[in-house]
């Protein structure tokens, strides 16, 4: 199966899952109206009726748009955009297809020594490893939930970040440690200082030191 067809199927499954959640939402709103709102005063009941209608409509429209979008562009949209912005779009797409077909599978994407392809929700991101100098796991919190990000920094002072599950980030960093000797991994104050000072040679030396430490 080609990368396009596989990602199209993944996008469709995500959209179907979203549709199911939308139907559950409709059932919940109807239940609230039947068991609680119908006993309110007429004015309040009428107001809640329109709120329910609006929410039910949104619960149907959202998944329907997701299904249409998944069928038309799927998860390939951002990948195609990435290739179109490159010097040779066809060659870049062919190389990314190789990453998808032969790279290490971390469930929400693929990685080899040239690219990381990350999938999160209905979106995708391609992170090139060329000119990458360091990568690490970054953890944030939102409404009490722990969010795990992969952060990759480059010699041109740019940074790419991708929200993934912790297992996927650990797999990516483990691959980089084994196969990308010039990329430092794992956040340290030393790494931050070297990057802030734009000491790319120092970061490369740090990466090599990390590898030597693993081999001891």
Image: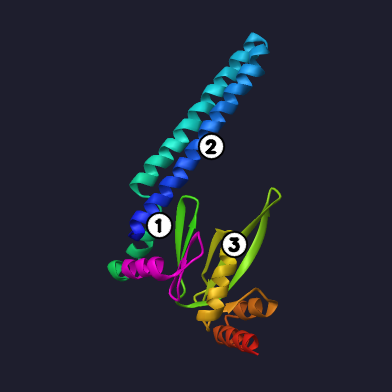
On whether residue 93 falls in the magenta region, the answer is: yes
Q: Which residues are magenta?
A: 92-116
Q: Quadrant of residue 89?
A: bottom left
Quadrant in the picture for the C terminus: bottom right
Q: Is residue 95 above or below residue 65?
A: below
> Please, what secondary structure does the residue beneath circle 2 have?
helix
Q: Is residue 89 left or right of residue 159?
A: left
Name the residue tied to disc 2: 21
What number of labels is visible? 3
Q: CA distance from mark 1 to mark 2?
A: 25 Å
Q: Is residue 73 above or below residue 138?
A: above
Residue nearest the viewer, comparing 181 with 193: 181
Residue 121 in sight from this viewpoint = yes
Q: Is residue 182 above or below residue 85?
A: below
Q: Quadrant of residue 209?
A: bottom right
Query: Residue farthest to the right?
Result: 144
Q: Position of residue 75 (x, y in %)?
A: 41, 53
Tell me whether the residue at label 3 lies in contact with that at label 2, contact meaning CB atoms closer than 8 angstroms: no
Which numbered disc flags the more N-terminal residue, 1 or 2? 2
Identify the residue shown where x is 52% and y is 27%: 56
């Amino acid at each position: 199966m080609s990368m396009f067809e596989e990602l199209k199927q993944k996008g469709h499954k995500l959209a179907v899952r979203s549709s199911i959640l939308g139907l559950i939402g409709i059932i919940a709103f109807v239940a609230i109206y039947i068991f609680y709102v119908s006993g309110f005063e007429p004015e309040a009941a009428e107001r809640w009726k329109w709120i329910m209608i609006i929410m039910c409509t949104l619960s149907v429209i959202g998944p329907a748009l997701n299904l249409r979008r998944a069928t038309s562009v799927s998860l390939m949209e951002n990948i195609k955009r990435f290739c179109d912005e490159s010097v040779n779009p066809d060659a870049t797409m062919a190389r990314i297809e190789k990453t998808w077909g032969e790279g290490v599978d971390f469930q929400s994407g693929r990685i080899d020594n040239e690219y990381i392809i990350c999938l999160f929700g209905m979106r995708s991101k391609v992170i090139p490893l060329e000119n990458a100098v360091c990568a690490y796991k970054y953890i944030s919190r939102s409404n009490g939930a722990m969010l795990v990000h992969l952060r990759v920094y480059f010699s041109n002072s740019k940074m790419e970040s991708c929200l993934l599950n912790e297992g996927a980030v650990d797999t990516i960093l483990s691959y980089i440690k084994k196969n990308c000797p010039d990329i430092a991994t794992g956040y340290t104050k030393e790494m931050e200082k070297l990057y802030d000072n734009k000491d790319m040679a120092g970061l490369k030396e740090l990466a090599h030191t990390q590898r030597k430490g693993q081999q001891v």
